[in-house]
Image (cartoon, rainbow, N blue to C red):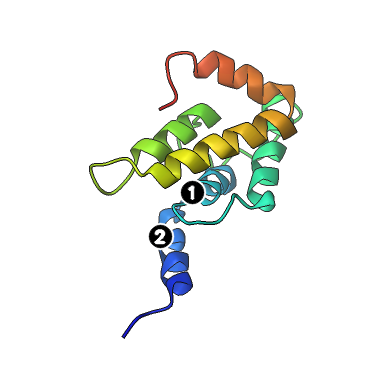
Amino acid sequence: FLFPREPIMSVKRAFATAGLNAVETAVVKATFEDDDRPKQKHIKTICDYVELELAGTGYDTSSMSKNLTLVEMFRKRINNTNNSSISWKIVIKTLITIHILFRECDLAFIEEFSQYGQNRVF
């Protein structure tokens, strides 16, 4: 007996985002290990954070656990897999998400990326 894939993936997605704030959840969901492209609503959440917090107009960071930068969130996402090998799907989706953010977000994202991503992202 085979189970439908989508309910299993939604349970995995729910466990992966438990206890995270809105921005961290958007990063995890945008780069989740599935065959779908990053959803626009997750990109918008990240862009809103960039525009409001990084550009200095205010964003609710009261639930930010460790005040991670976006670069650290992406780095954590790639390196935080349950098995010993890095998932190529997460890496590709992270690159796609970063590319979309370069195109669609405020210049503050590029500035943060150049400042905190100078050592390496992956």
Placement of the C terminus among the 4 image quadrants: top left
Query: Disc 2 designates what residue?
Result: 15
Task: Count the numbered circles shown.
Answer: 2
Is there any visible trace of residue 69 in the rendered image?
no
Secondary element at tag 1: loop
Please identify the quarter of the rendering in which residue 97 is found. Answer: top right
Q: Position of residue 36 (x, y in %)?
A: 55, 56
Q: Front-most of 6 and 45?
A: 6
Q: Distance between the residues labelled 2 and 1?
A: 10 Å
**Which residue occupies the extreme bottom position in the image?**
1
Q: Front-most of 25 and 81?
A: 81
Query: Disc 1 designates what residue?
Result: 20
As drawn, the label of residue 63 is none
Asked if residue 85 is positioned above or below residue 52 in the image, the reply reads below
Residue type at the position of mark 2: Phe
Asked if residue 10 is positioned above or below residue 87 in the image, the reply reads below
Residue type at the position of mark 1: Leu
**Which residue occupies the extreme right position in the image?**
57
Placement of the N terminus among the 4 image quadrants: bottom left
Residue contact between numbered discs 2 and 1, judged by CB atoms under 8 Å: no
Q: Position of residue 77 (x, y in %)?
A: 42, 40
The residue carrying pointer 2 sits among few (fewer than 14), some (14 to 19) or many (20 or more) residues within 10 Å by Cα, namely few
The residue at the point 48 percent across, 71 percent down is 6
In this picture, residue 102 sits left or right of residue 94:
right
Secondary element at tag 2: helix
The residue carrying pointer 1 sits among few (fewer than 14), some (14 to 19) or many (20 or more) residues within 10 Å by Cα, namely some
